[in-house]
Amino acid sequence: GEDVEQSLFLSVREGDSSVINCTYTDSSSTYLYWYKQEPGAGLQLLTYIFSNMDMKQDQRLTVLLNKKDKHLSLRIADTQTGDSAIYFCAERTSGYSTLTFGKGTMLLVSP
Amino acid sequence: NAGVTQTPKFRVLKTGQSMTLLCAQDMNHEYMYWYRQDPGMGLRLIHYSVGEGTTAKGEVPDGYNVSRLKKQNFLLGLESAAPSQTSVYFCASSSGTGTANYGYTFGSGTRLTVV
């Protein structure tokens, strides 16, 4: 079955760039997503990328997709303390109605 | 603009008790989902529904039942709660598998403790 892997923890200083990585196994993935979960809250959709794209930029967020290596990354420029949260990568396979989530990467931003 | 609303937000149950978690969405979404989140396990799909009157099992369905009698509501039932069901439960909805697909909208979660 599908599997989505992420590193569990990332620590950066305020103002630095953060890069959160994700790998997936299903080559027929159509959409890939990044969600953010703040403490005590639900998951919030940050951004998504369609599988025929290799990059998407949205303000401070840049998503890179390497389909050959099945590798997805989320870059946060000028990381702020408010970016501290858990970030989930998720993938959807064509024709399926459910998402497969990674276990999440906890991002800690220190002043 | 409520989105996805879950009730209750917190609950403590004794082993063997039953309860129903309610999820309501006001976005006219076809698809609805129940996940549980446990430390180190990420999100695991319990049950989902692709339309009113339909339900399907996810990855961890045992011990849970669901119903989707109305399009806007998705109920998750625990018939006889066990300590292993202590978790944070999230409901989500989505518009479906069409090309204009923006993923799920999540509720804020229900924190359930079974003692």
Image (cartoon, rainbow, N blue to C red):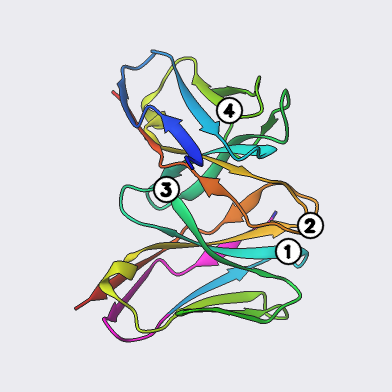
Q: Quadrant of the C terminus of chain B?
A: top left
Q: Is residue A42 above or below residue A59?
A: above
Q: Position of residue A68 (x, y in %)?
A: 73, 81
Q: Residue at x 36, y 27 (%)?
A: B83
Q: Which residue is label 1 attached to?
A: A29
Residue B9 image point, x, y percent = 35, 32
**Mark 3: secondary structure:** loop
The residue that mark 3 highlights is A42
Q: Residue furthest left?
A: A111
Chain of the residue under the numbered disc 1 shown in the image: A
Report the Cα–Cα distance between label 3 and label 1.
24 Å
Label 2 residue SS: loop
Residue type at tag 2: Ser
How far, Cα to Cα, is label 1 from label 2?
6 Å
Q: Are marks 4 and 3 on the same chain?
A: no
Residue type, mark 1 in image: Ser
The picture places residue A38, in percent across and down from the top left corner, at 35, 56
> Which residues are drawn in magenta?
A2-18
Foreground: disc 1 or disc 4: 4
Mark 4 highlights which residue? B74
- Do the CB atoms of the residues marked 1 and 2 lie less than 8 Å apart? yes
Say whether residue B63 is visible: no
Q: What element does badge 1 sit on? A: strand
Give the mark nearer the N terminus: 3 vs 2: 3
Above or below B74: residue A38: below
Identify residue type, mark 4. Answer: Phe
Name the chain letter of the residue that bears numbered label 4.
Answer: B
